[in-house]
Amino acid sequence: MDFDVDRIWIPDPTPGDFAVTTSASQNQSLSSALLPSGKLLWTFRILCATALTLSGYLAWTALNAIPVYGCGGGEVFDCGHVLTSKYAKVFGLPVSVPAVALYLSLLTVLAFFRRNTPENLLRAGWSVLTFGAVAAALSAVWFINVQVFELEHLCQYCLGAHSCGLILAGIILWKRPLGNWQTSAWSGASMAAVAVMITAQVTSEEPDLFVVERFDDVETSEIQITDLNEGIDFAPPGDALPEADGDNLFAPPVTEEPVIANNVFAPPVDFSEPADVAADPYAATSEPETPVVDVFDKQVSGEDGTTAEPAEPAPKPSADDASESTVATAVYLFISPSTARLLSKIVFLDEPTASGTTSEEKRNDEAKTVVKTQPAADSADKAATAPPKPEPRLVSVSGNKFRLNSRHWPLLGNPDARYIFVEMFDYTCPHCRKTQRAIDGAFKEYGDDLAVIALPVPLDGSCNDTVQGTSSSHANACELARISVAVWRVDQSKFKDFHDWLFASSRRSSASSRQKAEQLVGRTELDAELAKPHAAEYIKRHVDLYKKVGRGSVPKLMFPKSTITGAVSSSRTLCRAIERELVQQ
């Protein structure tokens, strides 16, 4: 059947039908304008996915308190230093956690960018993308500046995520799909959000990154022991180190009576007899010392290497040689009262005399007679020249396993301070630098009542055999510690000044440190001290104690009943620990 085309009726379009057709065409045109090209869309997705992966890994390591792989201890790149600073958290959360939420939101929005997506959804998506990308870029600028100028270390994972945010924001601000006005409005909102984050970080305190090891089974009465005749806890170095060479090699820089206690963790001390007994300020008399004769039936070696016959037993003292016996007795008393009594019984054989008194009683009577008959001038001269004998101040650590004499080790403060604890540290350690600021705050709180035994333990394998691989940031740690100990030995009053100067910057070279030490104690004196092995031997003893207390991280703040390992950034936290561990004991 044929149709006459001219006679077919075609109805005119109604105004409503025309309007609908025009609106749909406009919507399709606007959607096409808001929809990015395929390449640009995939670029956005790759940038967001990369930043999400890096931020997710950092968040996982932060929440599980594990180190970041392949990034730690370098001179420039040190994620451990960056991610433990106060700038690594915001409102108590690692900054990587909100970063994960941000990039996950952006990826979700990008998933809805399709050809059939309505124009209103595309506009909402671009609003979210603009706000998030600009916020990520501003945060990147802030954190990169913090790493470069404040922390002086970089984290490559952080830089990777920041780079993604900067590129993403750069593309959006270049294209401006929402127009200038809306793009500026959302960028302003991003700036406000980042400003809140920066304010929270700047006003927050440094985080405390430490663990506390307690020794609760130790009684307070055990900690307060001051008897120097206790049993051996840690042998003094005189048994293991070479004998003194006449230069007083292992002696501490303080002129005082040597501590012979076996349970005290001793510095490298010279146990050899001084060449001139009369020069000893604590000697009982200025007369020459009577040589002690070996009374045991043994052969002794002569000075020329030959073997001598056993010496005859020493005769019992008589009234004629009372002065000699008194001198010998005084020498024994200089060693230790209890030891003197024991040796006196061995040498003089405490037997009753014909008068019924023992030889010990007779010697006491003779000693009193000699003291009374000494010239008054000698007594006055001795009283005027002999300094008072300092009392040992023992500081207990690690549950009273080890005790240190405050006068025998590098010390910040007064050796007779009411509260003393021991610190192990490394001058090149950033966490030790944080703890040093807390210690400075504690000194302001307690003043002269506080002192710290400062034991450098370099994280450098050249003087610390517990370090398997020395990081470039710790390359000169041994030399800095050696110079510091040398300054203490030359002039103890200058030690704290040099100690604080070393910690004032993270990049102290050996040359600049030595120059500063020369300014404080003098070049001649410092060169003479560094030419000797004294400082190196002290550092060796510091490392020995470091091994005994469990090695691990530094800094270590050691109290009688606890040890704090890690950075204590808040002086208030440290003062609370001092109150708990020292003041209330």
Image (cartoon, rainbow, N blue to C red):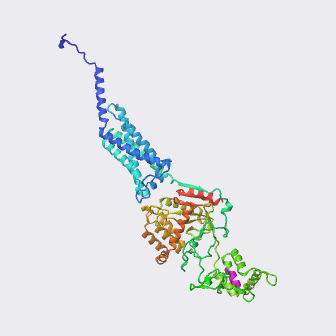
Where is residue 408? Give x, y as percent.
Answer: 58, 71
Where is residue 539? Give x, y as percent.
Answer: 52, 68
Asked if residue 483 is among those painted magenta in the image, a careful observer would answer no
Return the residue nearer the eye: 33 or 395.
395
Return the residue nearer the eye: 255 or 189.
255
Can you see residue 133? no
Hey, which residue is sitting farthest top in the picture? 1
Q: What residue appears at the point 82 percent right and 82 percent down from the top-left corner?
A: 356
In this figure, what is the number of numbered marks? 0
Residue 25 as seen in the image, left or right of residue 378: left
- Which image quarter holds the N terminus? top left
Is residue 59 depicted above or below 371 in this figure? above
> In which image quadrant can residue 338 be found?
bottom right
Highlighted range, magenta: 325-331
Q: What residue appears at the point 39 percent right and 49 percent down from the top-left corner?
A: 140
Residue 383 as seen in the image, left or right of residue 442: right
Q: Main secondary structure of the magenta part?
A: helix
Residue 57 as seen in the image, left or right of residue 344: left
Is residue 342 depicted above or below 109 in this figure? below
